[in-house]
Image (cartoon, rainbow, N blue to C red):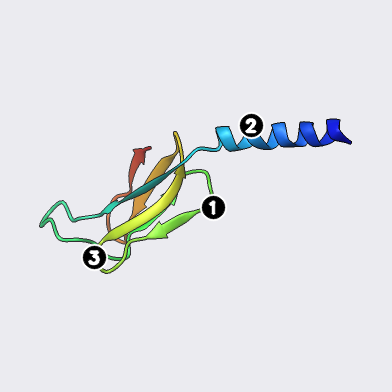
Amino acid sequence: MKRTLLLFYSLLMGQLLFAQNLQVSGTVKSAEDDYPLPGVNVLIKGLNKGAMTDADGKYSIQVPKGKTLIFSFLGCKNQEKVI
């Protein structure tokens, strides 16, 4: 029994050490007039997870290290940024 628990805890700790997410936040602004853009989709490439900018163009999302964020907005070209 002790051996099984020890194995379980060591596997759990290994997952916690390697699952390092980063809190990413920022403001999305228009390149033309530097105004904040509300309603921009901020998606993690390859995952079913995302966020949307608020009325001030601000967003905050937990992203696994090394993943790519995709910023998409109706009528604009998507942009990708590696974290």
Q: Which residue is mark 3?
A: 56
What kind of element bears circle 1? Answer: loop
Which quadrant of the figure has residue 10?
top right
Label 3 Cα neighbours within 10 Å, binned few <14 / some 14-19 / many ≥20: some
Residue sitting nearer the eye, 32 or 18: 18
Q: Tag 3: residue type?
A: Asp
User: Which numbered disc, 1 or 3, marks the residue that appears first in the sequence?
Assistant: 1
Which percent across, then down, holds residue 53?
A: 32, 61
Viewer-side label of 1, 2: 2
Instruction: Using residue 21 as the reference point, say whether residue 59 is left or right of it.
Output: left
Q: Which residue sits at x=18%, y=56%?
A: 30
How busy is the neighbourhood of tag 1: few (under 14 within 10 Å), some, or many (20 plus)? few
Q: Position of residue 49 (x, y in %)?
A: 50, 53
Q: Secondary structure at mark 2?
A: helix
Of circles 1 and 3, the one toward us is 3
Task: Identify the image quadrant of the N terminus.
Answer: top right
In front of the other: 81 or 74: 81
Tell me the CA gap for discs 1 and 3. 24 Å
Residue type (three-letter) at the residue carrying disc 1: Asn
Residue at 45%, 36% (x, y): give it: 65
**Could you say which disc has been placed on residue 48 in the image?**
1
Q: Which residue is mark 2?
A: 14
Q: Secondary structure at mark 3?
A: loop
